């Protein structure tokens, strides 16, 4: 079942044309990576999906409901949660408070049988991230970078999303901590969490993604199973990421 269908969107920052007919799909239970160098339009794609930016043309449908023109809070209530780049932990709040503030309104969605999402609780979060349980009374902004990233992902889960958007999950993290975050994404994948991730790390994508889209200059230039790139067509990664 297709959860998200982004079709031929053109998005601008004021007069600057950023996305040129970008299209992608995310099916229920998939982990999809949107890969590309910095500045090619990946974050703009996320901002278009979540309603921070409104495409000038094209369509974005979530469970067949048009998102273009909806405000961000209404899109979030439909079941899309954003884990932002840069973490954006709320200052002055403890780890526990950062989690509880993310709990949405009581779910009043109709016809939940096919699209029911995991009902996350703080106990489940602390089982997934034991370090956060140890730090639950500590102010969130005082955590290490890796711990803050875990808290940001955990905060995104607390709204019980049908689709989790994750922007640069391992950016700026030490290799060992990045591996831990990657292990977490694998655990979420096994639990059936649907994710769309932005990154330029083919190693992380290779571990966790079902499919990948490569973006360049505001357009999708390649799509397919991630292993097709890593094993059979490394020239794609070299061309659009500058890596082998």
Image (cartoon, rainbow, N blue to C red):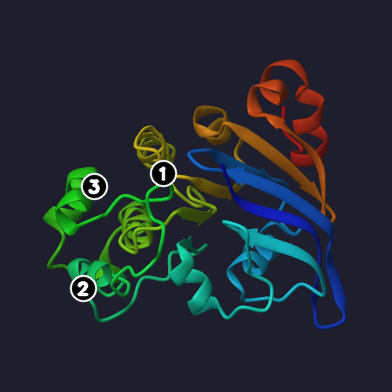
Q: CA separation, marks 3 and 1?
A: 16 Å
Query: Which sits earlier in the primary sequence, circle 1 or circle 2?
Result: 2
Query: Which sits earlier in the primary sequence, circle 3 or circle 2?
Result: 2
Q: Nearer the viewer, mark 1 or mark 2?
A: 1
Q: Give the secondary structure at mark 1.
A: loop
| Residue 44 x/y as whole percent | 69, 65
Indicate which disc residue 11 carries: none
Quadrant for the C terminus, please: top right
| Residue 163 x/y as whole percent | 48, 53
Which picture quadrant has residue 71? bottom right
Above/below status of 184 relative to 166: above
Q: CA separation, marks 1 and 2?
A: 24 Å
| Residue 239 x/y as whole percent | 83, 35
The residue carrying mark 2 is 97
The residue carrying mark 1 is 193
Indicate which disc residue 129 carries: 3
**Residue plotted at (43% across, 64% down):** 87
| Residue 142 x/y as whole percent | 26, 68
Quadrant for the N terminus, please: top right
Above/below status of 157 relative to 231: below
Above/below status of 15 relative to 131: below
Crowd class of label 1 (few under 14; some 14 to 19; many from 20; radius 10 Å): many
């Amino acid at each position: 079942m297709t959860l998200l269908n982004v079709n031929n969107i053109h998005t601008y920052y004021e007069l600057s044309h950023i996305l040129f007919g970008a299209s992608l799909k995310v099916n229920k239970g998939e982990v999809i990576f949107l890969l590309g160098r910095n500045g090619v339009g990946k974050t703009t794609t996320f901002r278009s999906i979540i309603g921070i930016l409104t495409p000038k043309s094209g369509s974005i449908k979530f469970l067949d409901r048009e998102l273009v023109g909806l405000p961000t809070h209404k899109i979030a209530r439909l079941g899309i949660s954003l884990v932002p780049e840069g973490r954006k932990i709320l200052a002055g709040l403890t780890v526990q408070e950062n989690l509880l503030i993310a709990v949405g309104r009581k779910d009043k969605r109709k016809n939940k049988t096919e699209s029911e999402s995991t009902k996350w609780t703080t106990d489940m979060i602390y089982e997934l991230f034991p370090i956060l349980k140890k730090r639950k009374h500590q102010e969130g902004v005082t955590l290490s970078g890796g711990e803050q990233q875990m808290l940001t992902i955990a905060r995104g889960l607390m709204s019980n999303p049908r689709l989790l958007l994750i922007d640069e999950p391992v950016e700026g993290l030490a290799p060992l901590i990045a591996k831990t975050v990657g292990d977490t994404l694998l655990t979420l994948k096994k639990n059936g969490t649907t994710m769309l991730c932005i990154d330029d790390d083919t190693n992380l994508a290779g571990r966790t993604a079902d499919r990948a889209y490569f973006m360049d200059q505001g357009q999708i230039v390649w799509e397919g199973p991630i292993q097709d790139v890593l094993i059979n067509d490394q020239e794609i990664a070299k061309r659009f990421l500058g890596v082998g």
